[in-house]
Image (tube, rainbow, N blue to C red):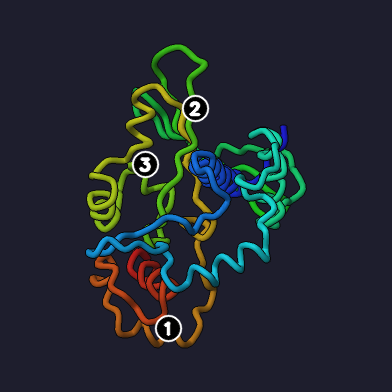
Amino acid sequence: MQFRSLSFVFVIGLLLGFLLLHAQLSAAQQTCDPLLDRVRDSSGRTESTMGNLAPIIRAILQDTSFRLDYRRRDGMTLEEWRRPGREEVARALSFSPNPVALDLRIESVIDRGDNEIRRVSFQSTPFYRVPALLLVPRKGKPPYPGVVALHDHGGYFFHGKEKLVYLEGEHLALTAFKAHNYGGRSYADELARRGFVVLVIDAFVWGERRLQYEHSPADLEAGLKAVKPAQAPVRTELCFGHRRHDLAWDHELR
């Protein structure tokens, strides 16, 4: 069986969802001019919601034409319009690695009674393997429903899949992050307890796939001298962005 990057598939699905939403909203409009929405002032006068920018934007729209605009589909059905839309999204993302064998590897297994955590990795593209946690129920009768659980961005790169799964020895700062962003719950655990098989990956540049240096750049090392380990969980804004922040985390957790 051959697979492409899960991250790529997720982005494709997200963009197609936006395209479909746009199409559904557009279908309800009777005009091809998106600038006719009006705002009313206190005197009852109306003008375009784009104000003085409306003529400029209208001119750009007319010049560019946006051939895949659903309102300009020239009699195409939804399916006929959707097909070139998908192709254009794939082209615009410009990432179509050659398919590869999955080559799934189970690194270790944690028995949690009603379910188990399998620490796995698989080949997603010719360029890298993806580390993941696979939660498998031990109750009920297979086959089980499956879910791919994707962690948030959160401006917090040190942890990825661990945001959704509780592991023994969880760092206090991660616990605090979950309390603030996930209501204190590891939702992949919740799904596994309810009978779902759950795959939780590290998205690119998070967790095990985060940016790391064998030898830290001098500017970052200099900046880190002003960061105390106790400050790292606070996630204060640092002038070097997430590179310096994550190095502070590395320094603390080592």
Give the image location of residue 95, x and y in percent.
Answer: 69, 55
Mark 2 touches mark 1? (CB < 8 Å):
no
Nearer the camera: disc 2 or disc 1: 2
Secondary structure at numbered mark 1: helix
Per the model, the C-alpha gap separating discs 1 and 3 is 32 Å
Residue 225 occupies quadrant: bottom left
* Residue that numbered label 2 is attached to: 146
Classed neighbour count for the residue bearing mark 3: other residues with Cα under 10 Å, few (<14), some (14–19), many (≥20): many
Nearer the camera: disc 1 or disc 3: 3
Looking at the image, is 121 positioned above or below residue 60? Answer: above
Q: Earlier in the sequence, mark 2 or mark 3?
A: 2
- Could you tell me the amino acid type at mark 1? Glu
Quadrant where the N terminus lies?
A: top right
* Residue that numbered label 1 is attached to: 221
Q: Is residue 219 left or right of residue 172?
A: right
Nearer the camera: disc 2 or disc 3: 2
Q: Is residue 131 visible?
A: no
Q: Is residue 81 left or right of residue 150?
A: right
- Could you tell me the amino acid type at mark 2? Gly
215 or 2, which lies in front? Answer: 2
* Residue that numbered label 3 is attached to: 165
Classed neighbour count for the residue bearing mark 1: other residues with Cα under 10 Å, few (<14), some (14–19), many (≥20): some
The residue located at (53%, 57%) in the rendering is 209
